Image: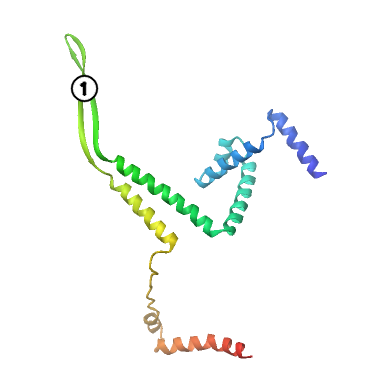
Amino acid sequence: MAKAKTKAKAKTQRKKKNTRPRSPAELARDKRRVASMYLRGQTQMEIAAQVGRTQTVVSRTLKELQAAWIDSALVDFDQMRGEELAKIDNLEREYWEAWHRSVGEHRKTLQEKIKSDDGDKDKEQVRTEELVGDPKFLQGVLGCIDRRVKLLGLDEPQRFELGWKEQARKHGIEDPDAFEEDLVEAFIAPMVRASEA
């Protein structure tokens, strides 16, 4: 009964706005637009204004999207890694293309109108500059390579030296090595006893 009232209410609201129900293709398109705008940091109100829906509809759509994202995240990390690698590859390709456009010969045409007794004349001057390339594009390539290496786990593991023993001495523990042995014994002994039982 409640569902019938909700459908009737929605139909009445559509009549008031003189709109028809959206097709599955239109709903899917709107979902993609909402997702894209949300991932770019736009607010629900901004999204609602751009897709022509209410903030409540946008909120409901975002909840559906977030649930779907969580489900997909639980499914296959290898597939996700592959998709991220594809994005990184695409971005690196764009950085390389931009780098190549920023290198080489660049022609600049300057036009100037000269007034004379004979009338206005156009004077054109062509200047050629040799561009050496914009280093920010190479920084982008390097960033892509670094991200790919991290994603694939190709870096050597980092070793961190924890200076806890010096801190322990400062706080009154005279023999940090003996203290460490006592801690290990305190945690391991119960596990050994449990496994022997």
> What percent of the width, then of the height, locates residue 121?
20, 14
Residue 87 lies, with reference to residue 150, above or below; the image says above
> What percent of the width, then of the height, locates residue 46?
54, 39
> What percent of the width, then of the height, locates residue 173?
41, 86
Q: How many numbered marks does the figure carry? A: 1
Residue beneath the point at 60% across and 34% down: 52
The type of residue carrying mark 1 is: Glu
Residue beneath the point at 74% across and 34% down: 11
Quadrant in which the C terminus appears: bottom right
Quadrant in which the N terminus appears: top right
> What percent of the width, then of the height, locates residue 12?
75, 33
Closer to the camera, 14 or 70?
Answer: 70
Residue 7 lies, with reference to residue 62, above or below; the image says above
In the rendered image, which residue does mark 1 sit on?
124
Closer to the camera, 11 or 110?
Answer: 110
Tell me the SS state at disc 1: strand
Crowd around label 1: few <14 · some 14–19 · many ≥20 (10 Å): few
